[in-house]
Image (cartoon, helix red, strand yellow):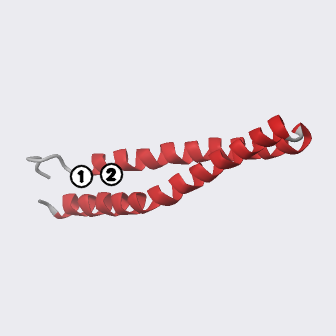
Amino acid sequence: MGKKCAHKVERAEAVFVFASEMEHPLEQARSLAVAMRLLGQGMIADYNPQYGEPVFAIADAVKDRLEEVLNLWEKLFEAAGTLAPADGDTP
């Protein structure tokens, strides 16, 4: 494997490790946003829409942004895969 190709593989591995470390915190944040949405929905249904609607709206916006971040996170894995040579490829 050539020096240039080896460097690409190292970069791909670094991206993969970084992205892997992000998975758990991102999933936790998404779960918290979903829980906040449910809290807001419960407040709207059982208590007072005046108090529940802002909670729901903020949690919904956060959940949407986290979904965008998770989509980008998945693209990191795809990008890491394109940097690494396929088996049998030569530099």
Q: How far separated are the C-alphas under marks 2 and 1? A: 7 Å
Pick whichever, 51 or 11, lies toward us.
51
Pick whichever, 15 or 45, lies toward us.
45
Pick whichever, 9 or 60, lies toward us.
60
Left or right of residue 59, residue 14 in this image: left
Residue type beneath disc 1: Ala
- Badge 1 element: loop
Q: Residue furthest front?
A: 46
Residue 57 in sight: no
Instruction: Answer few, some or many: residues within 10 Å of disc 2's Cα (few below 14, many 20 plus, some between 14 and 19).
Output: many
Q: Quadrant of residue 61?
A: top right
Q: Residue 34: where, in percent of width, then height?
A: 63, 45
Residue with the mark numbered 1: 84
Left or right of residue 27, residue 17 in this image: left
Residue 86 in sight: yes
Quadrant where the N terminus sits is: bottom left
Residue with the mark numbered 2: 80
Q: Quadrant of residue 11?
A: bottom left
- Taking the spot 65% from the left edge, 48% from the top edge, the residue there is 35
- Taking the spot 29% from the left edge, 48% from the top edge, the residue there is 81
> Marks 2 and 1: CB-CB under 8 Å?
yes
Pick whichever, 27 or 72, lies toward us.
27
Residue type beneath disc 2: Ala
- Badge 2 element: helix
Q: Residue 76: where, in percent of width, then height?
A: 41, 50
Disc marking residue 17: none
Left or right of residue 13, residue 51 in this image: right
